[in-house]
Amino acid sequence: MENLLVAENIYKQFGNFTALNNVSIAIPRGSIFGLLGPNGAGKTTLLRIINQITMPDKGRVYLDGKPLHPNDIAHIGYLPEERGLYKSMKVGEQALYLARLKGLSKAEAKERLEYWFKKLQIEGWWDKKIQELSKGMAQKVQFIITVLHRPKLLIFDEPFSGFDPVNAGLIKNEILQLKEEGATILFSTHRMESVEELCDYMALIHLSNKLLDGKVSEIKREYKSNTYEVGLESENDTALLAELKEKFVIGNTNFKSINDDLKLTIQLKEGETPNQLLDYLLGKARINHFVEVIPSVNDIFIKTVTQHA
Amino acid sequence: MRNLKLIIQREYLARVRNKTFIIMTFLSPLILVGMFALIAYLSMLNSSEQRIIGLFDETEMFASEFKDQEQVQYLDLSGKTFEEAKQMVNEQDYYGLIYIPENINNDLEGVQFFGKESPGLGTIQAIEKTIADRLTREELIERGIDVNQLNEAKTEVRIEIQNFSGERTSKMSNYIKMFFGGAAGYLLMMFIIIYGNMVMRSVIEEKTNRIIEIIVSSVKPIQLMMGKVLGTSLAGITQFTIWVVLAGVLAMTSFYVLGIDIFTVQKSQLETVEQIAQPEIAQLVMDVLNLPILKLIIFFLIYFIGGYFLYSSIYAAIGAAVDSETDTQQFMFPVILPLMLGIYVGFFSVIENPHGTVSTIFSMVPLTSPIVMLMRIPFGVPWWELAISVALLIITNFIVIWIAAKIYRVGILMYGKKASYKELFKWLKY
């Protein structure tokens, strides 16, 4: 089975508002899948449907090739965006309670909690109440509860919000390690840099519709515009620039360099190759910098969303 | 089922471990006892006050009739002039002055009471009766009727009420039935309000804490709701049991402490009271024993469970629909209304006519039936009526829990939205 989770043609309406309009996603086993979209796009609704908190009006969800069953909650770990804990309950007590709700036995839950508490360096918190902890501290506890029952599928909704950089890094490493151990991870965010860093696959939802999905590298390939960033050193910059402008579409750019370069982006016509460009440039200037411009997820996001506004 | 058990356990412990719960459980009986003690003490203060009432009797017939009593002392001022008597009463701060004119006739016209403040109803009645008795006696003698013979001829009639199944009742037993039925109904209402509110607050807490979404990714919302309702009801039963035990212990100790007091002081009075009171006390005990106690207990439990579940699932839905407790006001009134209605119908209509149309209807309507039917049961309710009432309650429970669960399911995930009734109606279709 190639995909761990498949959501097919999910349609959900709240009153007159369509929250999801025929959205389908497929999450390959062992991958990290980023679900992107502006606020209110329908990401959380889709996550809730996968978690069987909300039922879709139309469409089906399959886990491991079988239609989703209520018992599947034991195979899914969900860290919602709106997350909290009981204020007046002790940390250890409620972690135990939530773990047992996921189907773990008391002894098993306790053993694993002790392991994780040690791993995240929070052993001393067992008898503390949540109201004594900071928001970031509470997030650690929630993270542990999400992964404790070793689910096949982990779903994180904005996992890094509320963490300081140190703890965000800690959690990121934990997520990568969980992937290493075979977990499939779906995470929803509007922070593009974390998608860039972590995700193998992504889907973009905007105004209840899926606009884009696939392998991150393929999407980027699709969105690149045959443009190259160059740093040229020549005797007469003005003359060179004038010459280039006649042949290519030229843009300004900036990058770090120790030389006093002419910094340009050069967009090639369809069918032209970078080798041809290099050939052309070789005789005219010293080439200090030559890089293909690959669109960032952020660029793709903004481009797609503004196109469909 | 395993999860439901876990939820019930957590909810129960969360309620019982709460400091307010512990304090209220042990403090409220003390407050109640303290209140009764205070009332008793205050009324004792009130009645130990000695009053002096002056008597200005132009006929000179009544001075011997007005006998001094524990709280009232009569002072014959007939020897003085009326003005002097009035002045004396005023200056000495007496309670008042009775004026009886010379030509008094049978309708007591002309008798007057002077006082700084208007006297209590009891005082006036006592004075009227004293004068009227004397006048009646005079009148009887004048007409040649032997007063002693008349007294002998007087009979006391006590109507014995008997129903068709042969259970004997008396007027006294009606009061006992009212007391037991009323207490049961009132207790039920208090329980529903207090514990329904607890369920609601706990739902709001989970919503504002944002733990709700973590929990509903593991359990079905209806499981969480039912677990909450059940766990809280167990906490209620615990509190109730503690109260019953405390009340028992308290009653025993107070009898022990006060018992000696009562028997030594009132020994002389007790002997006279005994002869009159004994058959009545015996009757009282008989009446209490004749109550369908087992039936009352069984139906208290049935109606408690039915009524509590009905209302607390509504409370849970309200809690889910709002973001904070201050927003609950608009939904609370329709919940409290039928409960109050039940109590009023119970205390006015059932006592007046336990099997009248109004009482019967309200003991069938599910929102009021737990209270009203409980009040009716001591008066004897036919089995078929109970069956209909309970059946209606069960059916309504299913419908209301179903609706409440739908509102709950949607509401718990709605943040920052102030729900209106229109909104709630829409949620049913989500």
Image (cartoon, helix red, strand yellow):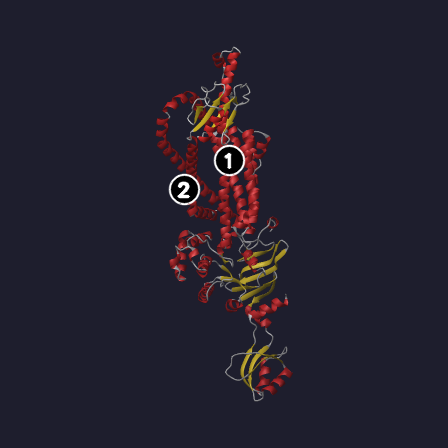
Task: Give the label on residue B26, or none.
Answer: 2
Location of residue A13 in the rendering, given as x and y in whole percent from the top left corner: 62, 55
**Residue A278, quarter of picture:** bottom right
Task: Give the label on residue B388, or none.
Answer: none
For label 2, the SS is helix
Q: In the displayed orientation, state which residue is furthest to the top.
A: B144
Whether labels 1 and 2 belong to a single chain: the reply is: yes
**Which of the chains bears the disc numbered 2?**
B
- Residue A262 as seen in the image, left or right of residue B80: right
Is residue A185 shown above or below B153?
Answer: below
**Residue A215, quarter of picture:** bottom right
Task: Give the label on residue B185, or none.
Answer: 1
N-terminal of the two: label 1 or label 2? 2
Decide if residue B277 is in sight here.
yes
Decide if residue B223 is in sight here.
no
Location of residue A76 in the rendering, given as x and y in whole percent from the top left corner: 50, 57
Classify mark 1: residues with Cα within 10 Å, few (<14), some (14-19) or many (20+).
many
Q: In which quadrant will I find the C terminus of chain A?
A: bottom right
**Amino acid type at image mark 2:** Phe
For label 1, the SS is helix
Is residue A186 shown above or below B265?
Answer: below
**Which of the chains bears the disc numbered 1?**
B
Location of residue A129 in the rendering, given as x and y in whole percent from the top left corner: 42, 55
Q: Residue at x 50, y 33 (%)?
A: B182
Q: Nearer the viewer, residue A247 or B328?
A: B328
